[in-house]
Amino acid sequence: MRRLICVGSPVWRPQINDRISSNPNVCGGEPCIKRTRIPVRQLVLMLRNSDSIERLLDDDPTLTREDVLAAPAFADGPSRKHT
């Protein structure tokens, strides 16, 4: 089983939405799925590299389908303009 972890340089943003949060004490403030230390950026990269939603859910049972779907929506959304 793979574990999704914080990697790379952090990007800090304030409160994002009901699925994604940014806390300076979690992954250096990088936007993560709430209740986890799974960075949005990591999920987006995995989806773009052809990992299926089902595989991501199998890899980490703390994730929900809605969490995974929120990651690319966040990455492509208007909140990116705040970085």
Image (cartoon, helix red, strand yellow):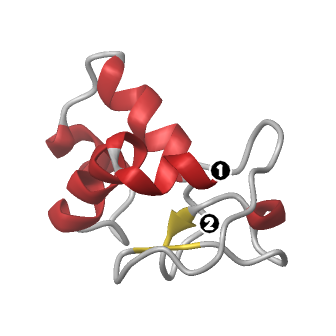
Does the image show residue 2? no
Identified by mark 1, the residue type is Ile
The quadrant where residue 46 appears: top left
Q: Residue at x 54, y 47 (%)?
A: 81
- The reply to whether the C-beta atoms of the residues labelled 1 and 2 are less than 8 Å apart is yes
Residue annotated with mark 2: 37
The quadrant where residue 7 appears: top right
Count neighbours of disc 2 (C-alpha within 10 A) and say few if under 14, some if 14 to 19, many if 20 or more.
some
Q: Residue 60's mark?
A: none
Q: Position of residue 23 (x, y in %)?
A: 72, 78
Residue annotated with mark 1: 5
Above or below 61: residue 50: above
Count neighbours of disc 1 (C-alpha within 10 A) and say few if under 14, some if 14 to 19, many if 20 or more.
few
Name the foreground residue: 16 vs 6: 16
In this rendering, would 40 be left or right of 74? right
Q: Residue at x 33, y 21 (%)?
A: 48
Q: Position of residue 19 (x, y in %)?
A: 36, 75
